[in-house]
Image (cartoon, rainbow, N blue to C red):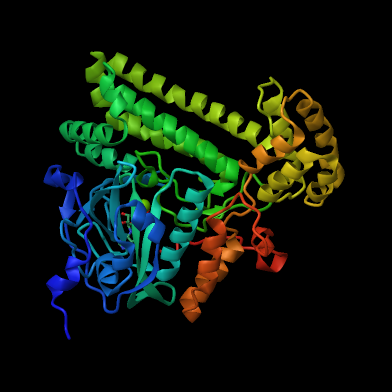
Amino acid sequence: MALTQETELATIRMNFDNSYARLPGKFYARVNPTHVEGPQIVKLNTALADFLGMDSAALNSPEGAAIFSGNRVADGSEPLAMAYAGHQFGGFSPRLGDGRANLIGEVVARDGVRYDLHLKGSGPTPFSRNGDGRATLSAVLREYIVSEAMFALGVPTTRALAAVATGEPVVRETLQPGAVLTRVAKSHLRVGSFQYFLAQGDTEAIRTLADYAIARHYPEAVESTKKYRAFLDGVIARQAKLVAQWLMLGFIHGVMNTDNTSISGETIDYGPCAFMEAYDPEKVFSSIDRQGRYAYSNQPHAMHWNLARLAEALLPLLVEEEGSDDAGMASAYAAMEGFGVHFEAARIAGLRQKLGLTMQDKGDTALADDLLKRMAENNADFTLTFRRLCDAAAGTDGDEAVRLLFTEPRSFDAWAVQWRARLAKEPASTDQRAAQMRLANPLFIPRNHLVEAALKAASDRNDLQPFEDLISVLAHPYDEQHGKERYAVPARAEETVTATFCGT
Ligand code: AMP
Ligand code: MG
């Protein structure tokens, strides 16, 4: 018996409440996703669906596939493409916008927070320029794996709710299966959203957008007599902490353009991102980053630069708030000074945790930097060095496993002497310390060769098992997992991934 469309739809309730769609029309283009041939759910994140107050069982169905591919506009959804500009590798584009994505609406989740639902790869929009509006299954699953891994690692990030295969090929260097990712974010406001209106000299729109961002992400700023400065301070503080967290995990974003820098302080837009294996502060993976602009250790500078672009866009409001051009400029500069302060504080706090130091000692930064320098000289795996250090914190029996990661193990020995001298000043028992350290030093990160193998199996052989296995391990990155040891091991020489591609 054929069900009517009404009956089918009745099972799926999303409770949309779309605040962005209530902003003036110049903030977006209303456009529906483009129909795809054969939508099929590749992965539904049921835990996230439940958290968002959705009926995950009902969504795991052809109707769910229709909604998350964009074939069906769910009740209450108001699809649109957001307008934004952006500096891409330093060059300014006044009009980027969602060229292959739709914001389909917002829902308030169990934590009381409002989240965007966004389809990426959902077809052309007025912002597509020459692009096809589509995404490959491989890029979609890559974002799924890495964003969910970041979430499990405790890093603010957008999340992946669903990956749906479109049943249509996408033309890249080769023909590849296409897919749509349903992304969940506290919002999709970017530094580039503000730049879009700065480029048009539209201060009123900047004010509207800032008020919107404050209400949604920085409500405490309203209590300040200088709310736009408080807003700028808030974004700077969150982004400084975020970049410090990236560094603590060896994460390289890869495309830190201003359109990929979120106002909410979440990691957004996982393209050619990667976690490094052997520690190398100059490390770059992205094949399009030829100058190393977004190299591992350049990320704080890149973020500072991006936030200066936000300060620039907010300048008209700061000038008003301060009463003169000079005072407005001074306010922007003072806000930018905060970046270094927040970043350094977050970095050293992160390093102390990684090294098992709960007290503060003047020499801690030098001690940590000395270890990093030795790791770089000895090709030591970033993740495993810190993880094995947790065992070494429990006793010198653990040293051997760390030493083995260094090409010249004596380099570690020399450092370990200083470290133990410093640990002697700490109050915690060795076992407590090791346990604490394991909460800051993951065992499992999305190692590039494992990610590539999972994407290849899915794309080339329609085999999703490696993807499923990988995300299940990465959901508990700080726990030992029996039988999963191979996921913790660095790539063998022949498996090493040296470059990542936007692979859009
Ligand atoms: P991204 O590199 O994903 O941050 O995208 C930068 C800009 O290019 C954004 O405006 C995207 O919407 C746009 N874009 C990326 N890929 C495509 C595509 N396949 N079709 C249309 N626009 C795209
Ligand atoms: Mg982007």
83 or 130: nearer the viewer: 83
Q: Is residue 337 above or below residue 53?
A: above
Q: Position of residue 265 (x, y in %)?
A: 40, 39
Point 24% across, 24% down: residue = 317
Residue 159: x and y in percent read: 40, 53
Quadrant location, ligand no. 1: bottom left
Which of the pair 128/214 is nearer the observer?
A: 214
Image coords of residue 380 (percent x, y):
73, 49
Residue reaching furthest right?
410
Left or right of 188 in this view: 291? right
Report whether residue 75 is seen.
yes
Q: Is residue 301 visible?
A: no
Whether 363 is drawn above or below 170: the answer is above
Which quadrant is home to the C terminus? bottom left
In the shown orientation, is residue 405 left or right of residue 186? right
Q: Nearer the viewer, residue 92 or 160?
A: 160
Observer-nearest residue: 472 or 321? 472
For residue 38, side relative to residue 238 (left or right): left
Residue 65 percent across, percent down from the top left: 29, 70
Residue 74: which quarter of the image?
Answer: bottom left
Residue at 61% x, 49% y is: 478
Measured along the vertical axis of the image, is residue 138 above or below residue 144? below
Quadrant that contains the N terminus: bottom left
Residue 274 picture quarter: bottom right
Most distant residue in the bottom direction: 1
Identify whether 457 is placed above or below 266: below
Numbered disc total: 0
